[in-house]
Image (cartoon, helix red, strand yellow):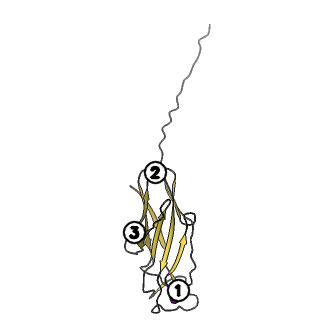
């Protein structure tokens, strides 16, 4: 009787789950027409038009920072020294909250928008308020008062 040849080999699987923290800003541009007679200008983005955060990491925080301290004259490529006199205010409405958190956006500090825990997703509505006065100047054609808001999420 011939000898039976057998072979054995093993495959070991070692898996880990990467930390996941995703931010989805649903609206990327807000075209406003500002008027001192109708000041302050306000615009609301409900939770479906605001920000969605998804995380599988316990404890996260969402921050916002503005590119400039107030809406500033922009020619499409550079800022000038002309700016609105009063700052933009942002209110965040995390899902389930009827009362917003008022935030004075800043270019020197990241300001807290909301925080959350792992699992699922959290939607945040946004409210913008921009006061305008007769001291604020109209701009040349092709120029707008402009800023970029950067939202950053950090895991705890």
User: 10 or 79, which lies in front?
Assistant: 79
Label at residue 111: 3
Range drawn in magenta:
36-40
**Disc nearer the start of the sequence (1/3):** 1
Element assignment for label 1: helix
Q: Residue at x 37, y 71 (%)?
A: 109
Question: x, y percentage for residue 26?
Answer: 57, 66
Label at residue 38: 1
Label at residue 143: none
Q: Residue furthest front?
A: 98
**Where 33 sits versus 49, above or below?**
below
Label 2: few (<14), some or many (≥20) within 10 Å? some
**Disc nearer the start of the sequence (2/3):** 3
Determine whether label 2 and label 3 are within 8 Å by CB.
no
Q: Residue at x 44, y 51 (%)?
A: 57
Q: Residue at x 52, y 29 (%)?
A: 10
C-alpha separation, residue under disc 1 versus residue under disc 3: 28 Å
Label 1: few (<14), some or many (≥20) within 10 Å? few
C-alpha separation, residue under disc 2 versus residue under disc 3: 21 Å
C-alpha separation, residue under disc 2 versus residue under disc 1: 42 Å
Question: x, y percentage for residue 44?
Answer: 54, 72
Q: Which residue is mark 2?
A: 118
Element assignment for label 3: strand
Of helix, strand and loop, which mostly describes the magenta segment? helix
Question: x, y percentage for residue 27?
Answer: 57, 69
Q: Nearer the viewer, mark 1 or mark 3?
A: 1
Determine whether label 1 and label 3 are within 8 Å by CB.
no
């Amino acid at each position: 009787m011939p000898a039976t040849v057998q072979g054995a080999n093993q495959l070991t699987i070692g898996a880990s789950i990467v930390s996941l923290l995703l931010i989805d800003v649903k609206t990327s541009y807000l075209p406003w027409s500002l008027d001192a007679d109708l000041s302050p200008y306000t615009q609301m983005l409900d939770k479906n038009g605001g920000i969605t955060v998804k995380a599988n990491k316990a404890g996260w925080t969402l921050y916002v920072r503005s590119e400039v301290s107030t809406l500033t004259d922009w020619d499409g490529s550079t800022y000038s020294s002309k700016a609105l006199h009063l700052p933009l205010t942002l209110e965040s409405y995390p899902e389930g909250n009827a009362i917003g958190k008022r935030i004075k956006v800043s270019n020197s500090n990241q300001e807290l928008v909301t925080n959350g825990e792992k699992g699922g997703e959290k939607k945040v509505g946004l409210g913008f308020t921009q006061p305008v006065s007769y001291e604020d100047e109209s701009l040349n054609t092709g120029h707008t008062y402009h800023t970029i808001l950067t939202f950053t999420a950090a895991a705890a």
